[in-house]
Amino acid sequence: MKKFIIVLAIIFLPLAAHAYYWFPANPQMNITPLQTTAVVYNPYAYPIFCQGRVDAQTYYGPVIFGYMNTWVQPGQYAYVYVYTNYGNPFINAWGQISCGY
């Protein structure tokens, strides 16, 4: 029984340690009066899965948000867009995107 547990530990511990490796992507934010964009780049040699949220506050107070759930291929970018209208421009934006293997 002891050998069986050791064999299971050898097989499953490396898998469990790698399965939930998430890291903050620190998106590049670009804000204009009518559009807010968050950009994530994948510098690795394999695809990563990214998910996150971008919030943008308008001049009159409401916060508009957008979500992202996507795979980012090696050397590619992923974008999140948030839009508003002409009478209520964006004044602030922030976002948090996490990626994992």
Image (spheres, rainbow, N blue to C red):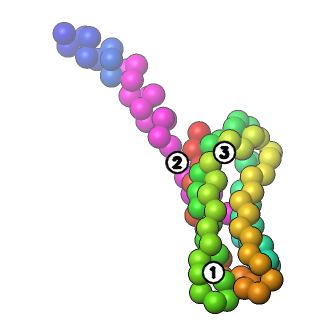
Residue type, label 1:
Gln
Describe the element under mark 2 as helix, strand or loop.
strand
Marks 3 and 1, the one that precedes in the sequence = 1
Looking at the image, residue 83 sits to the left or right of residue 67; the answer is right
- Which corner quadrant holds the C terminus? top right
Q: Is residue 40 magenta?
A: no
What residue do we see at 43% from left, 36% from top? Answer: 17
Marks 1 and 2, the one that precedes in the sequence = 2
Residue type, label 3:
Thr
Q: Position of residue 79 (x, y in %)?
A: 75, 57
> Which contiguous range is marked in magenta?
10-27
Q: Quadrant of residue 30?
A: bottom right
Residues tagged 3 and 1 counted as in contact (Cβ below 8 A) = no
Marks 3 and 2, the one that precedes in the sequence = 2
What residue do we see at 67% from left, 89% from top? Answer: 59
Q: Is residue 44 visible?
A: no
Quickly name the residue at label 3.
70
Quickly name the residue at label 1.
57
Q: Is residue 3 visible?
A: yes
- Picture layout, residue 2 above or below residue 96: above
